[in-house]
Image: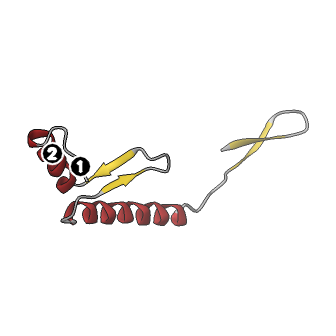
Amino acid sequence: MRPYLSLDNKVDGAVLVVVDIDALKRTEQAISEARAYAEDVLRTVRDPLIVLSADLCIHSANDCLLQHLQGLARGNRGALAL
């Protein structure tokens, strides 16, 4: 709320701005649901899967990939991973 000043610089009223945030909240909910769905897909994929960011940094990996990499580290030191 902002005061409305008269010509002699005295408060003569107030201005109240009301903004509809319904669309923003709906979009926020849709993004949250899409993220949860993508995370569920990542968790349930049976093949090793890694998600990289645009600059090729690891964003996330599923359990299958992590188990595969642990197996490589334990018994196959020096072997090719692919």
Q: Nearer the viewer, residue 7 or 71?
A: 71
Quarter of the figure with the C terminus: bottom left
Q: Under tag 1, what secondary structure?
A: loop
Name which quarter of the figure residue 57 lies in: top left
Which of marks 1 and 2 precedes in the sequence? 2
Q: Nearer the viewer, residue 42 or 64?
A: 64
| Residue at the farthest top position | 9
* Residue that mark 2 sits on: 72
Q: Under tag 2, what secondary structure?
A: helix
* Residue that mark 1 sits on: 81
Q: Which mark is residue 53?
A: none
Where residue 70 appears, as percent x and y from the top left, is 14, 44
Residue visible at 41% across and 63% down in the picture: 29
Q: CA distance from mark 2 to mark 1?
A: 7 Å
Q: Nearer the viewer, residue 73 or 28?
A: 73
Q: Nearer the viewer, residue 2 or 13?
A: 2
